[in-house]
Amino acid sequence: MNTKKGVPFSISHDNEAITGCTTSTVIWHTPFTTGTCFSLAPHTDISAETYGEDKLLHVLQGSIVISAPSMTAPVQMGQIILIPKHTPFAVQTEEGAVYIELYTKEDTTMNLDGGKIYQLAELVPCQEGKIINRDIIASEHVKLALMTFGEGTGLTEHAAPGEALIMALEGKAIITYEGKDHPIKAGESFVFEKGGRHAVKADGPFKMALLLTLD
């Protein structure tokens, strides 16, 4: 992943828009999946394009409007939308925006309806004393899951079989990585190297998205 590793960071702060411009930065890439961060200055747009893969867009900052045949969809910060493959779509923004676009080249299970807007953090409830997991995208080489932690719950130290990106959605937690504690809060992210030893402990109710890429 072309991002900071082993420390909390903000994808949106690290990819601030340039006045009058649209900017794209690949933040992870494997033979099977790509994640690109788009930074759009106010009153800019990306003209309509068509792709051979489903595209999942997650707005991290600001808001965008998706224009596609028979659909105009405003997508706000914290929301996601799945654009089905072979659908021409354009993106525009009035206030400016930062969003992530994820796609995979292999057959996947997409547990979302195309063209529908979702509030990402609301797709999984948080309950006292429980850890709850919901897969949003699943394939042989990539998984996007949502996880919620009741206050005081957590995952004991373990290692993932591939690189992993955590995006904190609500609340706070302590990430322990290679023996060192790192506080993380909503709006921040954390990357684990393949095989990196890590643990998660909720500091109050906590929600996060987990992207796991496998070789």
Image: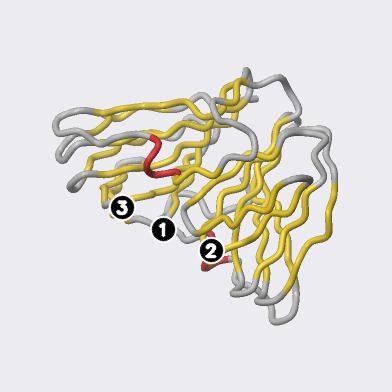
Q: Quadrant of residue 197?
A: top left
- What residue sits right under mark 3 in the picture? 182
In front of the other: 70 or 207: 70
Question: SS of the residue at dot 2?
Answer: helix
Q: Quadrant of residue 147?
A: top left
Q: Residue furthest front?
A: 70
Q: Are marks 1 and 2 in contact (CB under 8 Å)?
A: yes
Look at label 2 and name its amino acid: Ser
Residue at the image position 49 percent from the left and 59 percent from the top: 77
Taking 138 as reference, is 181 left or right?
A: left
Q: Residues within 10 Å of mark 3 (few under 14, many from 20)?
A: some
Q: Are marks 3 and 1 in contact (CB under 8 Å)?
A: no
- Give the Cα distance between marks 3 and 2: 19 Å
Q: Residues within 10 Å of mark 1 (few under 14, many from 20)?
A: many
- What residue sits right under mark 2 in the picture? 12
Taking 89 as reference, is 117 left or right?
A: left
Q: Position of residue 160 (x, y in %)?
A: 46, 27
Look at label 1 and name its amino acid: Gly
- Quadrant of the snapshot with the C terminus: top right
Q: Earlier in the sequence, mark 1 or mark 2?
A: 2
Look at label 3 and name its amino acid: His
Q: Position of residue 141 (x, y in %)?
A: 63, 23
- What residue sits right under mark 1 in the picture? 187
